[in-house]
């Protein structure tokens, strides 16, 4: 089967320096991958680079989505192809209601006029599953939302936009135990009913408890040091990242000697 | 914005100009003779002719304000203060000359009248060319007419009693200029207890090159009455300066309510030195909604005198300064009655080197006990070369006033644009959404068609450059 997402030897930098070093990974349609790593490893950066955040400069490598080279595509073009990024810190947009934003986004994405009735039904159902009060639909996007509400609003967008691949950047951070459970349930629905693929970026494992995981990747200081199956999550849970931090240092030393 | 289709807007909507070959045009410059000539053309009563001449003397004695944006590019020697198309005022669009009617058709005025207005006045250069009020509104006793008719008609005494009493010619140089050469504008009287359900509108179009427009708007909303009045303005662009020095005087009597909405879209060679003032009596309510998009330079600070006890005023305004524009706008609140309250919500946007200044003044007089005032102003700069300033002044002479001020100046956030783009929205659309969102407290206050026009203007500004 062809890969849905293929990251080939991707390097990226930002003004302060290089932050991704030749990262490669591939993900097939419908699969769930987890990207773990210590703080500052570049996990969020990878998520943003995959989505095309212009703050980062790709200095090498390629990103293929459904076989199409999207490395130079703007974020809206990637979204239209079926990519989605749930933000760790969703932005506030005063004067733009969540509902009006969703309608616009769906219209832009599909290029079709919106079927208002279907949209309303779907929105209602998605909000109910997320245990979001319906008043949020008419509130300005993320303005005055608590951290948890913002994360729920991200997953609500995921449910409504139905991308083929969702990158979830630290969706569980800032959520209490109950909220993690609620959010996981929606993600599971996306995974199972919509057959959506996931790249879940996290440094904890709470959100993974009720989700099926196919592969786990470990990122340390911008290097992808290990790819394994779901059991890797358990291992990290017990032993932390220390072993992989050392591994990365050794690999770097070795690489240095070769150079 | 998002609910309407607002694409495919063409600047030519505002930029077309009509031939003025068969127009009556007074020669440029300002002398006693030109003022007398205007007075004669307009068949003024004697008191008005004397008023004009007195105003001219005051004009000559006063100096140009030094505290705001430069108006050096404005030379009165080059401004024709009176230009009249070859027509008189009509009560039906069919009778309006074809070219002028086409102008207003393009601006959507006849259509707006049919669909959503109780009455319309359309001024073309110095004179009104069309005026009409719906029968049912007229039957309520509402008077809506051009100033010239008002000056000699049934309400002549009322006009004389109120004309330029709130904004006397001594107020500033351009108020004096207005007193000397004013022409056109509207007179509205809403009798006691009458509530006008749908808005009245005046549209001011300045077609002539190197000309001035000096319309006078006088509105009296009598006790317990209710009115929404809308003014719109536009002009084609010329490479020499045009001047707008209108004057708006609003009287809101006991228990009455007046909402005065403006969408100003003068061309970018216009010096907009406009004066607007409202006097609000006991338990009455004044609401200003103001959108300033056009003009080269603007000085615009609608002023409200909260004279009556428990009177209230709300000002909601937005200013959008693009390339080459210096727009100095804001509001003034003067509290003299007891337990009066005022609220200012101002937004400004600057782009492509435009300068936008918010200037406000809150004055709470001695004896104006229990006053409340709150100012909330926010500025959004769309790039690094634009400028935004906030100059709020407060003078509080009571010891129990509740006064608040909040100011925010910020740039459009790249992260927010990326955020919207990551949902499939194009960059230009994302910018427009953020800017329209920023402006939404103002567009929410406008009737739907005007909110759509405002959002179109925002889009247009964002697309230019």
Image: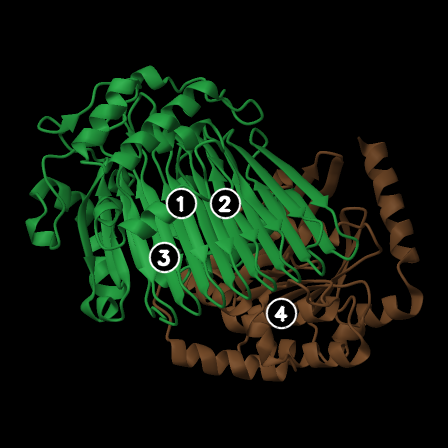
Q: Which residue is mark 3?
A: B229
Circle 2 packing at 10 Å, graded few (<14), some (14-19), many (20+), is: many
Chain coloured green in this rendering: B
Q: CA distance from mark 1 to mark 2?
A: 9 Å
Q: Which residue is mark 1?
A: B248
Q: Residue at x 57, y 55 (%)?
A: B307
Given this view, does label 1 or label 2 mark the residue nearer the observer? 1
Chain coloured brown in this rendering: A
Q: In the rendered view, tell whether residue B40 sits above or below residue B105.
A: above
Q: Are marks 1 and 3 on the same chain?
A: yes
Q: Which residue is mark 2?
A: B302
Q: Position of residue B140 (x, y in %)?
A: 27, 71
Q: Can residue A66 be seen by looking at this rendering? A: no
From the viewer's side, name the closer residue of A76 and B363: B363
Q: CA distance from mark 2 to mark 3?
A: 15 Å
From the viewer's side, name the closer residue of A176 and B289: B289
Q: CA distance from mark 1 to mark 3?
A: 12 Å
Q: Earlier in the sequence, mark 1 or mark 2?
A: 1
- Looking at the image, do the residues carrying marks 1 and 4 touch, with CB atoms under 8 Å apart? no
Q: Which residue is mark 4?
A: A153
Total labels: the figure holds 4
């Amino acid at each position: 089967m062809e890969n849905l997402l293929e990251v080939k030897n991707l390097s990226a930098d930002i003004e302060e320096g290089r932050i991704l070093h030749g990262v490669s990974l591939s993900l097939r349609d419908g699969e769930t991958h987890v990207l773990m790593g210590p703080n500052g490893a570049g996990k969020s950066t990878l998520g943003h680079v995959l989505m095309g955040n212009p703050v980062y400069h790709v200095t090498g490598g390629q990103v293929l989505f459904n076989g199409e080279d999207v490395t130079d595509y703007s974020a809206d073009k990637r979204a239209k192809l079926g990519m989605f990024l749930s933000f760790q810190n969703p932005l506030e947009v005063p004067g733009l209601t969540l509902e009006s934003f969703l309608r616009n986004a769906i219209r832009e994405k599909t290029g079709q006029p919106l079927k208002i009735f279907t949209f309303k039904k779907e929105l209602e159902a998605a909000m109910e599953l997320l245990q979001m009060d319906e008043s949020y639909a008419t509130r300005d996007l993320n303005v005055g939302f608590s951290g948890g509400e913002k994360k729920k609003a991200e997953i609500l967008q995921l449910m409504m936009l139905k991308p083929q691949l969702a990158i979830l950047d630290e969706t569980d951070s800032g959520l209490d135990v109950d909220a993690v459970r609620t959010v996981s349930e929606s993600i599971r629905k996306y995974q199972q009913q919509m057959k959506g693929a996931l790249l879940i970026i996290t440094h904890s494992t709470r959100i993974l408890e009720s989700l099926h995981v196919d592969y786990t990747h470990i990122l340390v200081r911008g290097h992808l040091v290990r790819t394994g199956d779901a059991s890797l999550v358990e291992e990290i849970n017990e032993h932390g990242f220390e072993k992989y931090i050392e591994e990365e240092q050794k690999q770097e030393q070795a690489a240095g000697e070769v150079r | 914005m998002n609910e309407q289709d607002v694409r495919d807007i063409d600047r030519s909507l505002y930029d077309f100009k009509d031939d003025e070959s068969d127009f009556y045009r007074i020669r440029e410059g300002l002398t006693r003779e030109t003022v007398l000539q205007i007075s004669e053309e307009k068949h003024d009563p004697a008191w008005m002719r004397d008023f004009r001449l007195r105003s001219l003397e005051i004009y000559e004695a006063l100096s140009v304000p030094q505290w705001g944006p430069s108006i050096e590019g404005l030379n009165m020697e080059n401004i024709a203060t009176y230009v009249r198309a070859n027509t008189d005022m009509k009560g039906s669009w069919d009778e309006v000359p074809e070219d002028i009617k086409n102008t207003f058709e393009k601006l959507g005025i006849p259509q707006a009248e049919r669909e959503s207005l109780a009455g319309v006045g359309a001024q073309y250069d110095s004179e009104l060319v069309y005026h009409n009020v719906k029968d049912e509104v007229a039957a309520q006793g509402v008077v809506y007419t051009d100033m010239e008719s008002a000056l000699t008609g049934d309400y002549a005494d009322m006009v004389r009693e109120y004309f330029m009493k709130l904004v006397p010619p001594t107020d500033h140089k351009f108020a004096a200029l207005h007193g000397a050469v004013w022409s056109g504008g509207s007179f509205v009287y809403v009798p006691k207890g009458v509530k006008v359900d749908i808005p009245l509108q005046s549209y001011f179009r300045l077609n002539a090159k190197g000309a001035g427009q000096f319309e006078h708007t006088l509105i009296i909303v009598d006790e317990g009455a209710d009115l929404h009045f809308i003014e719109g303005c536009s002009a084609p662009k010329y490479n020499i300066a045009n001047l707008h020095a209108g004057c708006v005087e609003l009287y809101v009597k006991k228990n009455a309510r007046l909402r005065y909405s403006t969408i100003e879209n003068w061309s970018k060679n216009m010096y907009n030195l406009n004066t607007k003032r409202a006097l609000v009596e006991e338990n009455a309510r004044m609401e200003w909604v103001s959108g300033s998009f056009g003009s080269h330079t603007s000085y615009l600070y609608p002023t409200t005198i909260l004279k009556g006890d428990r009177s209230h005023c709300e000002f909601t305004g937005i200013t959008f300064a693009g390339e080459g524009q210096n727009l100095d706008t804001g509001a003034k609140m003067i509290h003299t009655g007891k337990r009066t309250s005022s609220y200012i919500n101002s937004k400004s946007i600057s782009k492509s080197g435009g300068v936008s200044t918010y200037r406000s003044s809150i004055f709470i007089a001695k004896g104006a006990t229990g006053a409340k005032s709150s100012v909330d102003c926010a500025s959004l700069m769309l790039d690094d070369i634009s400028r935004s300033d906030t100059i709020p002044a407060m003078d509080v002479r009571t010891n129990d006033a509740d006064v608040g001020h909040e100011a925010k100046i910020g740039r459009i956030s790249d992260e927010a644009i990326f955020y919207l783009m990551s949902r499939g929205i194009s960059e230009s659309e994302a910018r427009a959404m953020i800017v329209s969102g920023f402006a939404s407290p103002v567009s929410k206050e406008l009737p739907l068609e005007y909110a759509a026009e405002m959002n179109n203007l925002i889009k247009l500004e964002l697309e230019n450059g």
